[in-house]
Image (cartoon, grey):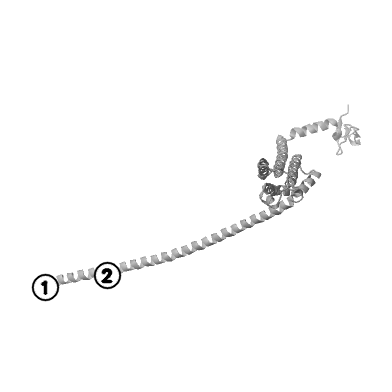
Amino acid sequence: MAEETVNINPDGSTTFEGGAGAGTGGEESTMPPVADTPGMDEETIQQVVKGTDPAIYLLLAVVLIGFLYFLYTRKARADAEDEFFASLEEEKFNLQLPEEVDEYYTVKEKLIKAGWKPGTVPESKEAAQNGPHRVIASALMKRAMADIPLVTHIQKESAGMNKLYSQSMCSVSQWRSYQAAEAMVSSEVDEVRAEADEIEPGWSQHIWRQAMQYHTMMKQKHELEQKQAAEQAAKRREIEQRVNEAKMKQMSSEDKEAAAERAAQELLQAEERERESKKSFSSGGATAMKKGFLDSKKKKK
């Protein structure tokens, strides 16, 4: 039986050559290329899988976990910011009626107990200016003036909130907070108008315009008083600064004079000590010389 040699060509095909007819060329095989063999694919994949470093899978897992954590934290941060701004918007419409509302009803109740009847027209101008009519009218005007900031706030926010709601750019809680605040203010406006007509028929058509004018006047007066107080405080600080500077200058001049006097006294004392030392030296030296001279004469004798 002749031996055959299997040759694998560069394109993946195989040829068989017989041992006896080696010089005549081999017969080409009809077997498919090695790359097309299903068994070889699975074996190759298994070899690749077995040859992969497990650290790569660990690295991929860490990257995936880090990416998911980043998405989670970003979403949580965004939700927290949305809740924060939503709470701010809700607090903006957390309105309360002023104390002047309760004060008005207290005054009204006292006047009714005293005999005043709502809707009665004063008999004369003097009665209107000095009687219960003036007291209840002043209390209602004070109430309306205290309501002006709420009315202007709702009027200012109305257009923006309606636009946001139409474009679905505000939450349901924000919209409900705005609606509750708007309903409260609208009810208060209607109640003030009704009370105004009880005090004086037809006053409901003018009370809110008058309240706005008085509120603006009082606001300007308050701002002017604050400005004047600030100017007076600045003037006082300037005057105090000048007085302190003058005191410092006076103290420095006095200190200079005191220092000069101390220096003069020290100089006089030094001169006095010098004169005393000279006197003591001169008197002591003369006596010593005389004694020495007499002693020398005695010794010569």
Amino acid type at mark 2: Arg
The residue drawn where x is 69% and y is 53% is 214
Left or right: where 128 falls relative to 234 = right
Residue occupied by mark 1: 297
Which structural element holds mark 1?
A: helix
Q: Nearer the viewer, residue 173 or 67?
A: 173
Work out how far the residue at label 2 is from the one at label 1, CA to CA, in angstroms: 34 Å
Q: Nearer the viewer, residue 209 or 12?
A: 209
Of tags 2 and 1, the one toward the viewer is 2
Which structural element holds mark 2?
A: helix
Nearer-N-terminus badge (2/1): 2
Residue 61 x, y percent position in the rendering: 72, 36
Q: On the rendered image, what quadrant is the C terminus found in?
A: bottom left
Residue occupied by mark 2: 275
Q: Are marks 2 and 1 in contact (CB under 8 Å)?
A: no
Question: Residue 114: which numbered mark, if any?
Answer: none
Left or right: where 39 falls relative to 174 = right
How many numbered callouts? 2
